[in-house]
Amino acid sequence: MDHRFPGIACIVGAVTLFVLQDALIKWLSGDYPLHEIVLVRSVIAIAIVLFVMRFEGGIHLLRTRRPGLQLARCALLVAANSTFYLALAAMTIAEATSLFFVAPLLITALSALVLRETVGPRRWAAMCIGLAGVIVMLRPGEGVLRLIALLPLFSAAAYALMQIVTRRLGTTERASTISFYAQAGFIATSVAIGLVAGDGRFAPEDGASLAFLLRAWTLPSLGDAALFVAIGVFNGFAGYLMSQAYRIAQPAVLAPFEYVALPMAVMWGVVLFGNWPDPITYAGMALICGSGLYVVHRETVLARARRAAGGRSD
């Protein structure tokens, strides 16, 4: 059975919900700590996962055959999310999202440097173009390297590794099982940070990202509480759809559709915050997006060629 189109539908739905969630988290980042938002979000999301699990076979699906891989995926996902949201507190959604989309380039580079897979000159050239886009968005010519922009790059690296783990888990685990352990990891991490820093004792007086991480817990207003709930609902369904997509379809098929996040990020940045990207940001976005899409396209073409002709790579 061809799972490409269900996988594509899942990934587009997941990306749409994730970008909306990111916009709401940025909206709340000036008043609440990240671990409080994530805790509420994950409690709601895990309830949704448990509800979905009832229709997939019942609570026995909580038993995992690969606890080590589940733990590794949780750690990578927490790292990817945390660093991205810390960047989001100090950057526009469009900038953070664009820098995050070096992930396909990182996957290709790691496959060559770590796994010793053959990567041809065209893909190396595309990665250099993507790196040029990163340098453009870091704006070193402004006098001070924007170190905060390194956070979404770290997030992209963790995310790339996480999706490789997801693909391996998908051979034996259901999407709801994978999503459950991801949300459980977020809850455990948020509770731990809350117990250590939830009173705000470590919160700095300035610095948007560190303040977002270490700010004291605050009881949300009624309107903000509704946003907390919305974030949880969006994340619960988006996490399930993302896990389902990478469980049933090839990453090379799905990856181009994750770039739907870029125009959505620009749109929400304009609508909610009035952040129109400047020409430098647009140039960096175009270089990163174009090179990433080319690498994904090239990976797909070569995979077909290897299946048909037996092993040659370019």
Image (spheres, grey):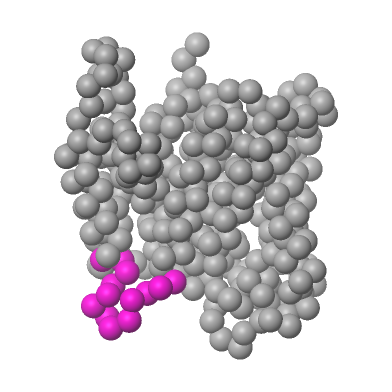
Please tell me whether residue 114 is drawn above or below residue 53 in the rendered image. below
Can residue 262 be seen at all in this image of the molecule?
Answer: no
Please tell me whether residue 265 is drawn above or below residue 204 in the rendered image. above
Q: Which residue occupies the foreground of this view, 46 or 73?
A: 73
Image position, residue 203 (x, y; %): 66, 81
Q: Which residue occupies the foreground of this view, 303 or 50?
A: 303
Range drawn in magenta: 136-148
Please tell me whether residue 151 is drawn above or below residue 116 in the rendered image. below
Image position, residue 296 (x, y; %): 32, 36
Q: Residue 233 lies in magenta, yes or no?
A: no
Residue ID at (27%, 14%): 310
Image position, residue 131 (x, y; %): 27, 56
Magenta: main secondary structure? helix
Q: Which residue occupies the foreground of this view, 16 or 70?
A: 70
Residue ID at (18%, 46%): 125
The image quarter containing residue 149 is bottom left
Image position, residue 66 (x, y; %): 67, 31
Q: How many marks?
A: 0
Please tell me whether residue 157 is drawn above or below residue 7 in the rendered image. below
Q: Which residue occupies the foreground of this view, 138 or 290?
A: 138
Q: Is residue 120 left or right of residue 64?
A: left
Q: Is residue 283 left or right of residue 5?
A: left
Residue ID at (68%, 72%): 32
Residue ID at (72%, 66%): 193
Can residue 33 be seen at all in this image of the molecule?
Answer: yes
The image quarter containing residue 191 is bottom right
| Quarter of the image that includes the C terminus | top left
Q: Residue 139 lies in magenta, yes or no?
A: yes
